[in-house]
Amino acid sequence: MLGAGGMGEVYLAKHIALGMKRAVKVLRTDLRARQESRDRFSREAQVLARLQHNSIVQLIEFGALDNGWPFLAMEYIEGPGLDELVAFEALPMASALVVLEQLAVALQYAHSLGVIHRDLKPSNILVRSGDLRQVKVIDFGLARLVDTDTLKKLTADGQPLGSPAYMAPEQVDGGEVSAAADVYALGGIAYMLLSGKPPFERKTSIQLMAAHKSDEPPRISSRCAEISEFLDSLFYACLAKDPAQRPASDELASHLSRITRGTELPRRPSAPAPLQLDDGPRVEVVASPWATRSVPTEILETAPPDGAGAALANQIIAMIGEIANYLSTSDPELTSLLRLEASIREQLSDVERDSAAVNLQLEQSSAMTVARLTQQQRELIERRRTLHAQQKPLQKRMIEVVETHRRYADGPVKFLFEQIDRALEHLDDMRSKS
């Protein structure tokens, strides 16, 4: 068992044929006889089936075990929850903004498909291998499909749902909840990441919910001196009591993406003024003379053989992946390619870990077991070779698809293309010298 929550228990499992790790969620024992709970469990499967995004946990299968219990099989995210990473202190500003941008983009994607999470909080965000560039939103057990009228309503009127520390005022009332509730929760998470504390701290859940409904939150700047005035106002606006006064998730994602990519910086007003969300930061972008070339799909094979050349080629591939991730919300093929490539990277990581374990056993083994371990080592080498062979055509196709967006690139995508073209020029110089 990996953990248990309000609806289910999650177990670590291994696919029998493929050997891949999966997280399998089953209904809690005390809820299995309740039709409402089974319906809600089915609703979670329908929600996850809609969502194909790099920062949202992926559904693998939905069905029933031999004993009739319904189950969800999902990708297994090996890493801590965001709550564990900020349990004792705030994150550095740059790290916090990288996390918040990924969450905002994931929410923008979910909201565009009519999905509201309704229980966004640090413990429902996993960090793969502790890498803050790879966050995954999980637990859509309380999610709502705003465009589905045929499904039975599973929330009684007046019943508050969510987590008190990050619950929007309209959730406290048990009223109609829109995508703005997720934005409110994201604002609360921003407070936690940047200051080490949620917006409100009270002794009881009742007092906490009352604070969300009636009390004004402090400014993050009162706890985190290094935050810019623009971000301070932006996150404060996320916690507006009136849902209509909060920024939409696409606005929030746009602001955070511009800031984290470094292409546009907030201007500093001459005097304090209320945030105008339709008047975000602006800076003139001048077209670069090198932004007319394209990335060769054979970049890894044509890179200079020395370590610096290979590292630069890998850096270019990483930037291509970053563009692909940014554009994936509007390009289904990129979404599919990213999922496949992520699966291969996960398997390669498993191979490297198993290989290290075999090598360690070889150093400590007796002569009787050397042959068996050597055979395992050969199998792992062959497995690695096969995965790399599968990865190359995916990377080539990703480059081709990303290149089709070059002529329309602006903002952060244009900035990344310019960075890539700089790296390509440097790579050409290294190739000619070698």
Image (cartoon, rainbow, N blue to C red):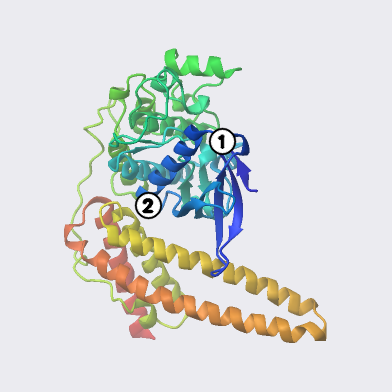
Q: Amino acid at mark 2?
A: His
Q: Quadrant of the C terminus?
A: bottom left
Mark 1, residue position: 33
Q: Residues within 10 Å of mark 2 (few under 14, many from 20)?
A: many
SS at mark 2? loop
Q: Earlier in the sequence, mark 1 or mark 2?
A: 1
For image coordinates 43% across by 31% down, the residue present is 185
Query: Can residue 169 be seen in this snapshot?
Result: yes
Of 403 and 232, which appears nearest the observer?
Answer: 403
Q: Amino acid at mark 1?
A: Ala
| Residue 178 image position (x, y, % from top left) | 33, 29
| Residue 175 image position (x, y, % from top left) | 37, 20
Query: Can residue 226 be seen in this snapshot?
Result: no
Q: Is residue 364 left or right of residue 338?
A: right
Check the image and report above or below for 348 versus 174: below
Q: Residues within 10 Å of mark 1 (few under 14, many from 20)?
A: few
Check the image and report above or below for 11 versus 267: below
Q: Please give the label number shown on residue 53.
A: 2
Check the image and report above or below for 322 versus 127: below
Of 283 and 189, which appears nearest the observer?
Answer: 189
| Residue 318 image position (x, y, % from top left) | 39, 64
For image coordinates 59% across by 39% down, the residue present is 28
For image coordinates 33% across by 58% down, the residue present is 335
For image coordinates 36% across by 71% down, the residue present is 395
Of 354 and 230, which appears nearest the observer?
Answer: 354
Q: Is residue 399 left or right of residue 190?
A: left
SS at mark 1? loop
Q: Please give the label number shown on residue 158.
A: none
Of 388 and 101, which appears nearest the observer?
Answer: 388
Using the rendered view, name the quadrant where residue 228 is placed.
Answer: top left
